[in-house]
Image (tube, grey):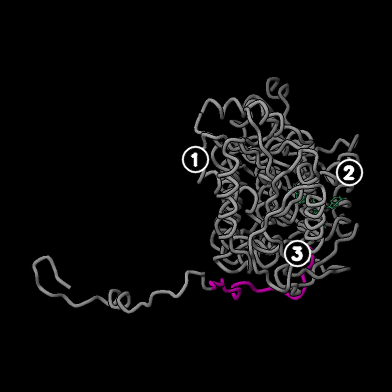
Amino acid sequence: MRTRAGTTSPLTELERKQVRAPVPKDWTYAPAPESRDIVRLEKQYGHYVGGEWLEPTDTYTTISPASEEPLAEIGQATRAEVHQAVAAARKAFDNGWSEISPSERAKYLFRIARILQERSREFAVLESLNGGKPIKESRDVDLPLAAAHFFYYAGWADKLEYAFPNQKRRPVGVAGQIIPWNFPLLMLAWKIAPALAAGNTVVLKPAETTPLTALLFCDVVRQAELPAGVVNIVTGDGRTGVEIVKAEGVDKIAFTGSTEVGKAIQRELAGSGKKLTLELGGKAANIIFDDAALDQAVEGIVNGIYFNQGHVCCAGSRLLVQESIYEPVVDKLKRRLTTLRVGDPLDKNTDVGAINSKQQLEKIEELVASGAEEGAEIYQPPCRLPEKGYWFVPTVFTNVAQSYRIAQEEIFGPVLSILTFRTPEEAVEKANNTPYGLSAGVWTEKGSRILWMAERLRAGVVWANTYNRFDPSSPFGGYKESGFGREGGRHGLEPYLQLDESEAFGG
Ligand code: NDP
């Protein structure tokens, strides 16, 4: 090697290695597994009630969907156990949590956020192990966003008078919170952070198939020295959810899950005086205009539907492509699909992980079969799936009519239905032709068109030239059968507060 002065200098160690490094024979990815040693699983978990672990009366086994390997025994909470948790939450509410200074409440939320950051690798590995999502998503999306949510609401806890000026604000009381399996820890954060910031206490039930990060979160609560009973976690299937909804001491229900269960909860609570927010399903349209940057749009389509195996309520599951660019978009998309790596969720190279449960896999398979039967054309890239576990190849349907079930029903899997349109008016009409109204995406280079579309799309969130972007400061929620109420942002505090204008003006 020659230096600038023309003298010869010895190779550095790194340069020597580079000189010796062989040229790879092919460019396939070598496995890059994340170690699971950081996670210490208990044999059995009880319910976290009043700051202590309750021995469960009944249990079931939670598994890894990628290997079907049993991971731990989990409590199936009975009515009595749910009532115990509600009583603990009520006691904590009455004995000080609702009265402590807002900046004290902020302190606890801030601590939780910090601990989540410190333990994020442990949580990410556990999330992927129990839920099947790729580690790069749990590591780079779920965990940072969950911590950000706690930080964000820590910031609001002592500023509620600015969030709702000229209104008297009181916490609602005990919040019953029921969450799904697609973003277990993130949904927990969306529920618990605003509830606590507003001065409520909570009883939360994670989904039957993904309880482990919620149970690990109890240890974060302990580390943060949160007063006993402020956060209570009970586990179990839908029967436990029913008991939370019915429990007398619960003042507010926050539910995320299927539209069917959401409707049942709404019927159950009618006339009860309990507050309710519902974040339900979706069948979002991702709309690509012919002036869009196509390569970026194709990445947005892939992120919109294959992120988290399509287990996303706001997934861009209906692709609306302007007719003039239909062929290049479909060609680019099919080519991109061949590069997606499906497999071990704990491998850092994996793009698409395991389907969350056997039940969900069967639902996807049934809907995909209906698409082929109704006349749509199916495309699946060549893909070797692991022998054990629950898997589904990323799938694209073309020749889809609006009436087909795959264009109407929420599949909640890695399955995209492609339709076309000619004019912006037709795009709006097709996008809104669904009972849902959670989200939409618009791809175009024209700002004016983005605003024109956003005004007309009946969706709670409209992304422009991007998709599936979340931020704690941005409210999220639906119209129509996608539910009501908002989570995130200042709006996310409102369901956890009683607001009274007259008292503030009077006093
Ligand atoms: P559910 O709506 O059944 O589950 C959501 C949560 O509610 C879970 O904790 C569940 O417990 C609980 N639950 C179930 N039944 C009741 C009840 N009667 N009262 C109170 N709580 C109840 O969704 P699934 O897991 O069955 O998924 C079915 C479909 O729902 C999916 O295929 C998808 O289309 C959609 N879905 C939408 C989600 C969204 O984010 N919008 C999230 C999840 C699913 P348990 O886990 O034990 O069933």
Q: Which residue is mark 2?
A: 264
Q: Position of residue 99 (x, y in %)?
A: 69, 42
1 and 2 marks in contact (CB < 8 Å):
no
Q: Secondary structure at mark 1?
A: loop
Amino acid type, callout 3: Glu
On whether residue 38 falls in the magenta region, the answer is yes
Disc nearest the viewer among 2 and 3: 2
Disc nearest the viewer among 1 and 2: 1
What is the span of residues highlighted in magenta in the rendered image?
Answer: 31-47
In which quarter of the view is residue 318 placed?
top right
Q: Is residue 82 left or right of residue 356?
A: right
Q: Position of residue 142 (x, y in %)?
A: 61, 55
Q: Nearer the viewer, residue 162 or 306?
A: 306
Q: Is residue 296 left or right of residue 122?
A: left
Quadrant location of the N terminus? bottom left
CB of residue at label 2: within 8 Å of ligand 1?
yes
Amino acid type, callout 1: Ala
Q: Nearer the viewer, residue 439 or 253?
A: 439
Q: Is any atom of residue 467 visible in this view?
A: yes
The residues bearing labels 1 and 2 have C-alpha atoms spaced at a distance of 43 Å
Q: Secondary structure at mark 3?
A: strand
The residues bearing labels 2 and 3 have C-alpha atoms spaced at a distance of 32 Å
Q: Which mark is residue 52?
A: 3
Q: Is any atom of residue 471 visible in this view?
A: no
Q: Which residue is mark 1?
A: 293
> Which of the marked residues, 2 or 3, is nearer the chain's N terminus?
3
Q: Nearer the viewer, residue 129 or 226?
A: 129
